[in-house]
Structure formats: structure tokens, C-alpha cells
Image (cartoon, rainbow, N blue to C red):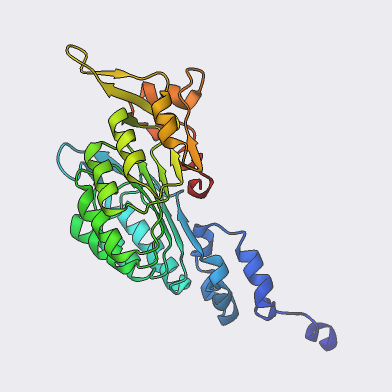
Amino acid sequence: MEDSYSTVRRWEDLDIDILVKIFELLDIFQLTSGIAHVCSTWRMACCDPLLWKTLDLSMLKSNFIKIPLEPFVYVDGRSDTTLTRLLKISLSLSRGNIMTLIFHFNLYISDDQLTYTAERCPELRRLVLPAWNRIKKTGMIKAIRGWKHLESLTMPTIANPPYLLEEIAANCENFSELKIMGPCDMFFASSIATYLPKLRVLSLRCSTLFKDVLILILDNLQHLEVLNISHCILMETAPPPQHKRIIREIDPAIHEKASRLREFLTCMQDSCIMCQRTRTDEGLVRWYKYEEGLWKTDEVRSLSL
């Protein structure tokens, strides 16, 4: 009887590589639920860099209500507590190895949460952060200055883009991809051209885009390789009383300017569901109305989640 018991292997004796393979099947909630406290071997496996290349929080949303004054959302304290706990455990286990960080478009992180995360993700290459309502200028500047290796950013439309783009230009020498989830006006486009002239990939999909803004982008971003304006409402200024009108087809002059690009992605078809949704939502897609996860898609492969 004693011999039969002696041949039984304990969980803590399982090979770490096998444990890592098993833990790769867990979602972030399961991975941070306490399995790292089972034993030293399990904790070692939980800290393996393979598990922490990406911290995907796209399944986590804030419990919030909209308010009329800045920051225009009020987040329930329990939501903040849940996110803070998840960040603390994840960032402790990751040991600075996170290279991609993804937040949901309805996850409103605070300045303190952003700063805490930035300090513990020094190797970050890609940030997907569609909601900035509660993030102040000082908080974002501090974060960007800590992300020297940042290459790709997905962000919302903001009122004052120069401060951000200037910080990226000064601190992130390998930055090459930008996705804006919202309208890109002349001010935003001019700021991109000024501070990020070597940008290689730009996605403006599912938003309102004026023709003169598109021309500015094509004329001034000489290093641009990929431009995605799929499902955009393309507009141009018009004399009174119209002031603006929708362009139904991209003219040959723009196609000529875009011919130097490796990819110029467009879709303006009446039969396209995403084009219909962009028009219904007047150029600012209400992603919460549609299929869960749809907001993550992009015609540019490197930007799709």
C-alpha cells in the first residue's frame, strides 16, 4: 500500500511548461483568481512571460452613468475597486513583461490607474485605450514618457491632440501606428502631420472625414504606407445654404495621391452594413448598440484585435 502512494505525483510536481500551457487556456479573471497562491511552482508558472505578452481587459466594462459636466461620466466605486484589484494582481504577476494592453471602450480608467499601469509596463508596444474621459493631460503625459517602446495606439478623438502627439514624438522613437475611434478634423490631422510625419499606418474607419482633411493627410504624411477610411462618411464643404455635402465616390485626384500607398482601404457602399451604421450614427458609431467585440475589428490586420 505504501508503495502505491509513493508513485502518486502531486500537482506541484507537474512540469512548469505544462502548467503554463494549461494556464494559457484561462481568461484574465481565472488567472488572477488566486491560483498563484496554490504553491511556489504554480506561482512561478503564473509569472511566465508567455502568459503576459498581452493584458486583455476588453471584457471588463465600467458601471457608469453619463453626467453633463466633465468628465461626463460617473463611475461606480465598485467598478473602480474591481479594476484596481485586477490591475494590481495582473501587473504583479506579469513582472513588467506586458507588451500589449487592451481596454474596453466603456472601461473608464482613472489617472491613478493609468499611472500605476504605466509604471509597471515599461516594455509596452501597443495600447488600445478608447475611453479617455477620466484621464487628465498630466496623467497621459506621465504615461507616455514611461512608454519608450510604444509603437501603436488606438485612441478616441480628443480636443487637444498636439500635447499628446508631441509627447509621442519626443519619447517613442519607434511609433508607427495610430487608430482614431472618432472623427479626425483638420486640427487633429494637422497635428499628426506636424508631430508624426513618419507615421506608417493610420486608421480613421467608421467616422466622419472631410475631403480637405484626407488631402492634407495624403500630401503631408510622406512615409504613410496604409490608410484606412473604410465606412467613413466622406464630406466636403459647400456654399450656403448647404455648407457641407456627402461625397458618394472618391474622385480620381485622391486616388492618384493615394496610389503611392501600399494599401488604401475604402468602403462607401450603400449595401455595406458598417457604412449604414456609420451613417445612422451620424459619423460617430455607438458601438454599444452592436455585436459585442465588433469595435475591435479593423481592415488593417495589425490593428484588428
Q: Looking at the image, which is closer to me, 3 or 214?
A: 214
Residue drawn at x 43%, y 36% is 258
Q: Looking at the image, which is closer to me, 145 or 43?
A: 145
Left or right of residue 229, residue 262 in this image: right
Image quadrant in which you'd find residue 48 = bottom right
Residue 274 visible here: yes
Q: Name the residue furthest top.
A: 241
Residue 218: % across, % down: 36, 39
Vertical relation: 305 (above or below) 84: above
Vertical relation: 291 (above or below) 23: above
Residue 52: % across, % down: 51, 66
Residue drawn at x 40%, y 35% is 257
Vertical relation: 219 (above or below) 140: above
Residue 210 visible here: no
Vertical relation: 26 (above or below) 294: below
Q: Looking at the image, which is closer to me, 278 or 113?
A: 278
Residue drawn at x 38%, y 70% is 122
Quadrant location of the N terminus in the rendered image: bottom right
